[in-house]
Every structure is written in C-alpha cells, then in structure tokens.
Amino acid sequence: MNRKSKFLVGAAIIVAAVGTLVWTAVRETSAYFMTVDEWAVDPKAHADAALRLAGRVSQGTVQWNPKTLDLAFVLMPIPKGQGGTHEARRAGEVLPAAAAAARLPVSYNGILPDMFADGRDVIVEGHVVDGVFHAKSLLTTCPSKYEADKQAPAGEAGDNGSPA
C-alpha cells in the first residue's frame, strides 16, 4: 500500500467514526416535544419513545422529599386562553374532551428548580412506564406575568402632563 492509499483509508475511518458518534448522539438526545393533552390523544403511540412534555402542575399534588430528592406530582394540560407554552401553535386545534382532562403522574429525582410550585407550567423530559412519567429532567417556564405597566393616557385625572 502506498502512502496516499494509507492516508485515504485513515481519513475514511476517521470520517466514519465521527459520523457514527454524531448520529448516535442525535438519536439518544432526540425527544418528541408535545403538550400533555396532545400526548393523551394516543398515549400508546409514544409508549417506548423519549418524550418532552409541557403541562401544568396540578394544585395540591406535589409531594417533595428533600432528603431523598424525590418529587411526585400530577401533570395536567395548560388550559386554553391562559397563555402557556404552546398557546399560539394550538390556536385552532380541537382536541378530544378526554385529552383536555388528561392527568399524568410524574416521578422525578433530582434538584428541585427554584420556581417549581403548584399551578406552574413545567416541561419534563423522560419516559412513560406503566402510566407514570419518569422524568430525568424538569424545567419550569417563566410566568407570563411580565408585561409592561399600562400608562394612563395624558389628560386623565391626576395627570398634570409632567413625568413622574
């Protein structure tokens, strides 16, 4: 084998190794991203898939053990008209009533995010096993209450036109 052939074989092996690593990494980290009500339409379709679900923590369901870092709660759909992660995408979508009323128990072990609380919108990533979502990561979404203060129009009572 001459020098050029050895170089080409070596380059081909390196390219194949890098390509395999990239393909494996993408396959292992990919997850379907959907809301709880979208998942509830056909839960069996995603039985063995890695999922990333957006939903709201159901009031009164949070069970947190700070010693073991075990967290359990129930994830419910984000009600329409109340903002949320997918409001714009779901604007015209009609879902079955059963999907809108879906509840999914979640089990998580790890550090509790600072903004986690009852009624908070969250995103969980993991797998559903025997009707329980086993989350490997838990993210809280920012509240949608960050809006600009509404200024009173000039000329209203108490407004002298000068800046405050």
Image (cartoon, helix red, strand yellow):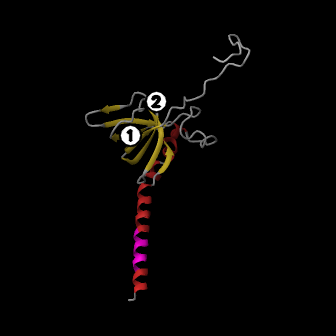
* Residue under the point 60% across and 27% down: 148
Mark 1 against mark 2, which lies toward the viewer?
2
Give the image quarter of residue 15: bottom left
Q: Which residues are magenta?
A: 9-17
Of residues 26 and 14, the one nearer the viewer is: 14
Of residues 133 and 145, the one nearer the viewer is: 145
| Residue 30: percent from left, percent from top | 45, 55
- Which structural element holds mark 1? strand
Above or below, 105 relative to 8: above
* Residue under the point 25% across and 34% down: 67
**Where, quadrant-wise, is the N terminus in this rendering?**
bottom left
Q: Residue furthest bottom?
A: 1
Give the image quarter of residue 60: top left
Q: Based on the picture, tell me whether residue 75 belongs to the magenta stretch.
A: no
| Residue 70: percent from left, percent from top | 30, 37
Q: Amino acid at mark 1?
A: Val
| Residue 136: percent from left, percent from top | 36, 46
Q: Residue furthest top?
A: 158
Which residue is label 2 attached to?
A: 119
Mark 2 neighbour class, 10 Å CA radius: few under 14, some 14 to 19, many 20 or more = some
Of residues 122 and 159, the one nearer the viewer is: 159
Q: Evaluate whether residue 131 shows in this view.
A: no
Which residue is label 1 attached to?
A: 106
Q: Residue furthest right?
A: 155
